[in-house]
Image (cartoon, rainbow, N blue to C red):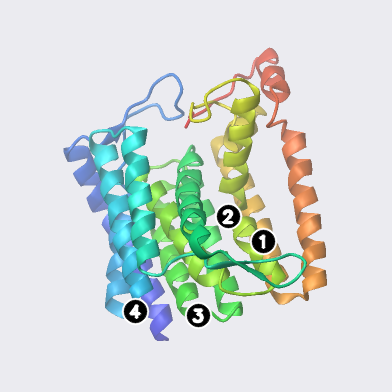
């Protein structure tokens, strides 16, 4: 068994065995998610499960990987994210406070060298960002951190989508020659899969903001290390394809709320998982369907990294068209599907985020 395989096994087992202990702690300190009219679960659920993912990831990385400046930035920023996540799961934190911690974590990562220094121009060459590197990197990290948090609406959804994204990110990073970033992504995926054993429907514990924010932050920073350092044209689009589900869902939510005259940060019941359940999908089927879409996007990203530039761009166009066709079919930008479901006597079962 290679050293990397041992690291992955250790991350998986640490989370698998550590999550029940975190569950007991969460119940003891009353870090629970209580049912109400807008939530799917019908009983109190412990919601501190993301802490098991954080601890397993840190333990394996510190024990097995050679530390670098960038690594300290990822671990330090992740600690700030985990801190505000635990605080929120225990006592509740205002959106402004969470945003301040997210920006602070992003700034720490940037200070340690985790930043987008250039962008590949689609017509050739690269665009050196210089001072624009800082706001671009902050927007990317904060945006992906919140995007993953927004899709945490059904049992196993955010964990499974994040695991698929991490595996894809790791694979593409290795193909692009950034092996260390790839290994870190695989360790993150193994940690999430250990937790998913306890979180898939019917869940025994939720990851809470501790988990969803931590996963979003790490996926964002590892994408910077593994995917934005290549000067190939297709590398500009790979992070967006790999993290397609949370990005698309968040962008559509912003457009939808703005067009409906609602505050952008107000919760609604029309995310992708809400739509699927409004169409009559069970929790399990809705989650598995979104897993399937995530895997399709992941396979597309891997193929794009392996193909020539022209072939990769053609596949990118096909993937983009397929996504928009799916969005239109589900009616995510309008209320048609939801209203039809309610008229048929099938009210949407949802967890507004």
* Residue shown at the point (28%, 33%) measured from the top left: 92
Say if residue 16 shows up in the picture: no
Which residue is label 3 attached to? 179
Say if residue 316 shows up in the picture: yes
Give the Cα separation between the discs numbered 2 and 1. 10 Å
Give the Cα separation between the discs numbered 2 and 3. 19 Å
Which residue is label 4 attached to? 65
Q: Secondary structure at mark 2?
A: loop
* Residue shown at the point (52%, 24%) measured from the top left: 263
Question: Around disc 2, counting alpha carbons within 10 Å, would you say few (fewer than 14), some (14 to 19), or many (20 or more)?
Answer: many
Which residue is label 2 attached to? 243
Answer with mark 3 or mark 1, whichever residue precedes in sequence: 3
Answer with mark 4 or mark 3, whichever residue precedes in sequence: 4
Q: How many marks?
A: 4
Mark closer to the observer (2, 1): 1
- Residue 254 found in image quarter: top right
Which residue is label 1 attached to? 237
Answer with mark 2 or mark 3, whichever residue precedes in sequence: 3
């Amino acid at each position: 068994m290679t050293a990397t395989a041992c690291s992955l096994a250790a991350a998986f087992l640490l989370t698998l065995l550590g999550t029940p202990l975190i569950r007991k702690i969460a119940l003891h300190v009353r870090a629970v998610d209580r049912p109400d009219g807008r939530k799917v679960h019908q009983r109190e659920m412990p919601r501190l499960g993301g802490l098991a993912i954080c601890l397993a990831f840190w333990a394996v990385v510190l024990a097995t990987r050679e530390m670098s400046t960038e690594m300290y930035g990822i671990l330090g920023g992740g600690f700030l994210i985990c801190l505000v996540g635990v605080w929120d799961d225990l006592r509740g934190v205002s959106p402004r406070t969470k945003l301040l911690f997210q920006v602070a974590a992003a700034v720490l990562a940037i200070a340690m060298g985790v930043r987008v220094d250039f962008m590949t121009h689609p017509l050739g060459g690269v665009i050196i960002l210089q001072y624009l590197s800082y706001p671009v990197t902050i927007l990317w990290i904060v945006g992906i951190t919140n995007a993953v948090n927004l899709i945490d609406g059904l049992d196993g959804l955010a964990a499974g989508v994040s695991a698929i994204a991490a595996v894809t990110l790791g694979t593409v990073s290795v193909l692009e020659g950034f092996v260390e970033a790839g290994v870190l992504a695989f360790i993150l995926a193994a940690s999430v899969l250990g937790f998913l054993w306890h979180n898939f429907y019917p869940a025994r514990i939720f990851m809470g903001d501790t988990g969803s924010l931590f996963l979003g932050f790490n996926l964002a920073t590892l994408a910077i290390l593994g995917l934005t350092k290549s000067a190939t044209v297709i590398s500009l689009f790979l992070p967006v394809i790999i993290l397609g589900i949370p990005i698309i869902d968040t962008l559509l939510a912003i457009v939808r709320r703005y067009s409906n005259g609602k505050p952008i940060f107000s919760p609604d019941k029309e995310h992708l998982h809400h739509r699927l359940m409004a169409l009559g999908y069970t929790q399990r089927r809705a989650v598995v369907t979104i897993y399937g879409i995530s895997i399709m996007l992941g396979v597309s990203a891997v193929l794009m990294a392996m193909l020539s530039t022209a072939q990769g761009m053609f596949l990118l166009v096909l993937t983009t068209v397929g996504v928009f066709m799916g969005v239109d079919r589900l009616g995510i930008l309008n209320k048609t599907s939801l209203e039809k479901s309610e008229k048929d006597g099938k009210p949407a079962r949802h967890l507004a985020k």
